[in-house]
Amino acid sequence: MFPVLFSLGRIQIYSYGLMVALALLLGIIWVGLAAQQRKIATFNQITDFAIYVIVGGLVFAKLLYVICEFETYKREPLAIFSGSAGSFFGAVIGGVLLGVYYTKKAQISTWNLADVIALYIPLGHMIGRVGCLLSGCCYGVETDLAWAMRCSSADDLLRHPTQIYEMIGNLLLFIVLWISGRRVEERKERYFPGFIFWLYVGLYSFLRIIIEAFRDSQILAFGWLRTTQVFSLLVAVVVFLYIGYRLKKKLGNERCASSTIHS
């Protein structure tokens, strides 16, 4: 494992932090160009938006991770200031809160921008998981499968490389969102602003349910279920019910409009 890639004097460059920074930089470029092309926002506005999202994401990522791993940080409180780990869900929550605040402030269409951002989150997440693999966090349980790896900074045991599992899952998720986005562009009247964003949230929640089954986590909720799995399942159910409701409502409005025209 390479939790620290190199040092600049007393400053240590963490692999996880560097990969997250790279993901954010590429994300700003991808989203900025796409948003500008679709006339949703200027590139400068996306840059300002990113600052709000980054601050909210970093703070909440560390906060939620500390809460989930409270016993560890209670023993080593100074580890809170380490850049080696964070919660993805925490980053999403913090980023969304401050991001929405900025869109309201700058009068940008929140949901249209959210659809563009959601498309590129899986790519950024893949890069972030490279950082997890290098730093040896978010690893899986022990296994004797042929593709088992020594992917934990805590020991040299052969484990499920859940970091790689999630990279593959996010690549598939990106492909699904890309195809869905094309379909939305072709038939906008059948969808609603924010559809791609909520589709991402729902599909990623299902992905986490699968990944968590192989991750080495002691935080159990009900029997063998992990807390993250229960949370992800609840999120997925609520999100897909909401998507179904919005699509049904959109279809109903479309039929009413069609009936009015013909009458």
Image: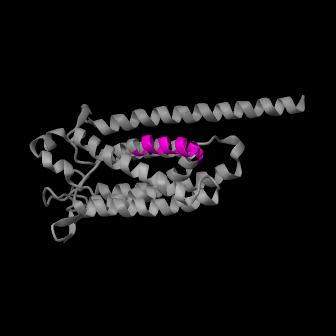
Q: Residue at x 53, y 59 (%)?
A: 44
Is residue 95 visible from the viewing direction of this image?
yes
Q: Position of residue 60 (x, y in %)?
A: 32, 43
Please provide percent x and percent y for residue 51.
42, 53
Q: Nearer the viewer, residue 32 or 145?
A: 32
Q: Nearer the viewer, residue 65 or 137?
A: 65
Whether the magenta-drawn stretch holds residue 101 is answered as yes
- Name which quarter of the figure residue 220 lies in: top left
- Highlighted magenta segment, given as a residue range: 95-112
260 relative position to 129: left or right: right
Vertical placement of 10 versus 179: above or below?
Answer: below
Residue 191: say if magenta: no
Judged left or right of residue 259, residue 247 is left
> Is 32 above or below relative to 79?
below
Q: Residue at the location (29% across, 59% down)?
A: 17
Q: Spot the residue most to the front.
A: 105
Q: Is the N terminus in the top left, top right, bottom left or bottom right quadrant? A: bottom left
Residue at 26% x, 64% y: name it: 15
Find residue 85 and report its horizontal and vertical position in percent: 25, 52
- In the rendered view of the protein, which quadrant contains the C terminus? top right
